[in-house]
Amino acid sequence: MWLLNSSIGRKLIMSISGLFLILFLLFHLCMNIAAVFSGEAYNMVCELLGTNWYALVGTLVLAAGVVVHFVYAIMLTLQNRRARGADRYATSARPKGVEWASQNMFVLGVIVILGLILHLTHFWANMMLAELAGVHGEIAPTDGAAFINFYFQGNIVNTVLYLIWFAALWFHLTHGFWSAIQTLGWNNNIWLSRWECISKWVATIICGLFAIVTIIFYLNGVGA
Amino acid sequence: MAEINSKIPQGPLAEKWTNYKAHQKLVNPANKRRLDIIVVGTGLAGASAAASLAEMGFNVLNFCIQDSPRRAHSIAAQGGINAAKNYQNDGDSVYRLFYDTIKGGDYRAREANVYRLAEVSNNIIDQCVAQGVPFAREYGGLLDNRSFGGAQVSRTFYARGQTGQQLLLGAYSALSRQIGKGKVKMYNRHEMLDVVIIDGRARGIITRNLITGKIERYAAHAVVVATGGYVNTFFLSTNAMASNGSAAWQCYKKGAYFANPCMVQIHPTCIPVKGDFQSKLTLMSESLRNDGRIWVPKKLEDAKALQAGTKKGKDIPEEDRDYYLERRYPAFGNLVPRDVASRAAKERCDAGYGVNNTGRAVFLDFSEAIGRLGKEVVKQKYGNLFDMYEEITDDNPYETPMMIYPALHYSMGGLWVDYELMTSIPGLFAIGEANFSDHGANRLGASALMQGLADGYFVLPYTIQNYLSDQIQVPRFSTDLPEFDAAEKAIKERINKLMSIKGKETVDSIHKRLGHIMWEHIGMARDEKGLQEAIKMLKDLKKEFWSNVFIPGSGDDQNTELEKALRVADFLEIGELMARDALNRAESCGGHFRVEHQTEEGEALRHDDKFMYVACWEYQGEDKDPVLLKEDLNYQFVTPQTRNYKK
Amino acid sequence: MDKDIKVTLKVWRQKGPKAKGQFETYPMEIHQSVSFLEMLDILNERLVKEGKEPIVFDHDCREGICGMCSLYVNGHPHGPATGATTCQLYMRRFHDGETITIEPWRSAGFPVIRDLMVDRSAYDKIMQAGGFVSVNTGGVPDANAIPIPKKDADLAMDAAACIGCGACAAACKNGSAMLFVSAKVSQLALLPQGRVEAARRAKAMVAKMDELGFGNCTNTRACEMECPKNISVSNIARLNREFLKAKLKD
């Protein structure tokens, strides 16, 4: 199967799964922004995404996206290390025009995954998983807004951890979005720099808004 | 004395090649599979021949000294390739290309060969375009042309300043296709050290594997030598570091005639020599002469100031500049052929008008072109060349005029071949720069690419069949035959001898001294006394080489110094033969200029009554004088005239 | 103005493909108008005179076109100059007292042969897999039979300028040969003559590249930045496009 055993095929999988995850981020961002203005509105969406079949399927697809993206990343990184050869350069210099992020995508990805795990223990485990398992603590699994307030309002540790997470994500996206488009072959001499610019904007909008929202939660909690 | 038979077909000039093809013997496809051909070299001629022969069905063994066939020095040709397409509707034709080439060669080439070259030139362009060579195009989508020295029409096709590269990559891609199919067996980093003759026919070669140092044997039904020219004899030239004359020289020592060795081309537009450390000279494309104007100061005191560095080129006012090519040759101006331009530069510098610290440079000035076309257009046309110049010299040619000086570039002489491109040894062919055939005493710009590809794509694949047609019954040869044993033994002895000298001089230091003798005595201007001296000096230097050279390392391993030593050993002998030939040819023609033989105006003076022949040298043995054989050139279709680029 | 400078060379020396290599240090005094390779010539001349073995490195045309020279100088393939090969590098790029580290290309696809010389035959093999237009000599149409828009011809020429030196794979942290492959695929895909077998070519060349153990492209653009011929990564996009189109059609 060429998606597995050709280098461009593997890259295509990375590209498509990555773009899919960016789409999800945009959707998630909308939810968070809603929470800034109204906890109730946020909880309505949470309810909609509770334990029903479409939410479960959506979650599974999403999880598959993350897993595929991550597994392929490991695979590619291992292959690429092998392709580099056993002997390494004693000196290296990043040439002008090469973004730092582009050469550190795997490390950035690992930070993003660690952040994701933290995030899932905060929310998904307490909400969808708790609901499925039928066990829950003081806060009801459907009351997302309450969880936000619980984890962020006045909680400097979580807030800073999340901000670090978004920073890593920003770097990851600045290269990731552009690279995904390039892998799809949707590029030429003129669009090369345009896509790079768009890529920075996409990353900045997503991570910037996530960060702002998080800071608002830290200061004010969800909107009334 | 052996009879020289050039095997030129009968009939009118324009029909000779057609007639030849119509009546030559062919090898049928089933039999082609049973025949092996060795092709040595992967430049334009070698790669195109290997690919074409393999496409036809022959088994080809192809050798190159670089790490990949794509690196042969044809790749460095910049300007372009000539063809008689007449796409510009400026009056070009096969006959005119033929005539310009014959005239440019100062009437020392064979009419029939040159006409054939002009004839197939058009097929080359078609072939290259079909291979995906990205020639320059007009906005209408059709091919663009530029003009080149020695022609009054625009017939040169080009791909930026990298025409040689693109043509070679075209041939390399065709070759790669055949290697992939298994029809060509490619041997990289192998250097041919000898040709093996069995019963009077070339049947194989001995090579040295440059990585392992192992001596290897290869047998075939025919051997094609496409190993380029020998101007690295001069140490400093525009040739690549590894370009050498050894393969051709071994053929000569096995009995192949060496023709017109004294005819080498000195290219007028190279970056001047800077110092002793210099390893090679860099050519600036001849295309620069389309828009650049060549000049030196009119006043000697200005020249002195330039040499002392107290003045710069732009400080000299227009009226004090001597555009000597435009002055001497109003009709062709800066686009006179290379030999004429080179000699004119030397004449000015010898008279004291040189413009750099060594007094060995003239200006190539683009200020007029920048004024006329604008900097942007000039940049588009020549930008990469200007950048290259600035990187090397630290001078910006947009602001100060470039400095150029002639340098060794190409050898018109080479292994003698007949009309079928076969040397005087049956079964041994020579193509491209390695043979002597088409350029006479001087090659026109953009004609080397044409000749290399003509030989490889369209001539040899036909003519070699005429030879092979009666070889189909001959079984493959074993490399265990005594002839192979003897050849290998001789080479091993030669290597052992070199390794055991353990003297004091490095190979390069002797090569540099060789180059110095060559440049001083067998360079742009030659005279009888100097040549006689040179022969003596070369003999002495050869003696010193064989008694005082030092080569580190081992003979049976990778050894770059040994590689160089083997080549220099041959260069020393090639130099001597060049001097001998130059001494014999008591006339001036093309790249060969004997100061005793010039007109009152300082132009080359030919003696058609005495030297209308190809000088073929036959090897007689170590330390014996070679014998001169003459192939008379009978001009039946054009009348040799004094070359005139004045009007 | 150019002047004499003192530099320290740290040169990778390795006896053979399997031997263990190490750096050796050579002090040099050199004029800045000397080219980098001429400096190595001078050093080699000195080593030979001392009875030592000269440093082995690939070089040939010394005018930036054959693609033979292949030194990794101070962390850059072909050294610090942009758009230039090692042989086009002059000592005026370096300053007095500088330490210059010289290494061979390092990539699993390019095993070291000796010292600074590596085996790049993998690139030839990729070309043999499909880097050509399948036409035999003779029997082709007139060169002007198919007009080609100047823009396409120019783009094809941009890609065709590749000299096959291997700097792209040497610069790539993934040891990927995508820029090299894409340059050839692009050149031929842009021209009507090569278009005919564009799909087959893209598949065959990528398959060979993968088979030979080159890495996966992650679009860092290091190849483009270090390419002595400034080959653009937009060629890689075109290769991706050609390859995906070809695969989706299957």
Image (spheres, coloured by chain):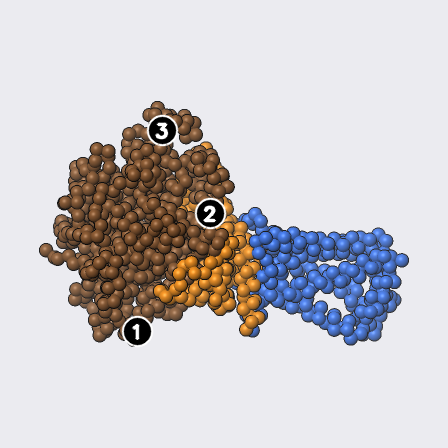
Chain colours: A blue, B brown, C orange
Which amino acid type corresponds to the residue marked 3 in the rendered image? Pro
Subunit bearing disc 2: C
Which element carries disc 3, helix, strand or loop? strand
Between the residue at mark 1 and the residue at mark 2, the CA separation in whole angstroms equals 47 Å
Which residue, given by chain and number where applicable, does mark 1 sit on?
Answer: B29
Q: Are marks 1 and 2 in contact (CB under 8 Å)?
A: no
**Which of the pair C43/B395 is nearer the observer?**
B395
Q: Quadrant of residue C9?
A: top left
Q: Is residue B606 above or below residue B227?
A: above
The x, y position of residue C189, in whole percent, is: 50, 62
Q: Looking at the image, which is closer to me, A172 or B169? A: B169
Of the pair B328 and B257, the residue shown nearer to us: B328
In front: label 1 or label 2 = 1
Write down the chain letter for disc 1: B
* Residue B337 location (% of width, % of height): 31, 43
| Most foreground residue, C230 or B645 | B645
Q: Give the percent coordinates (x, y) of residue C52.
A: 34, 48
Mark 2 or 3, closer to the camera = 3
Q: Quadrant of the N terminus of chain B?
A: bottom left
Residue C84: give its label: 2
Q: Can residue C5 be seen at all in this image of the molecule?
A: no
User: To which residue does mark 3 refer?
Assistant: B297
Q: Quadrant of residue A61?
A: bottom right
As drawn, the residue found furthest toward the top would be B301
**From what the image shows, is residue C174 above or below residue B406?**
below
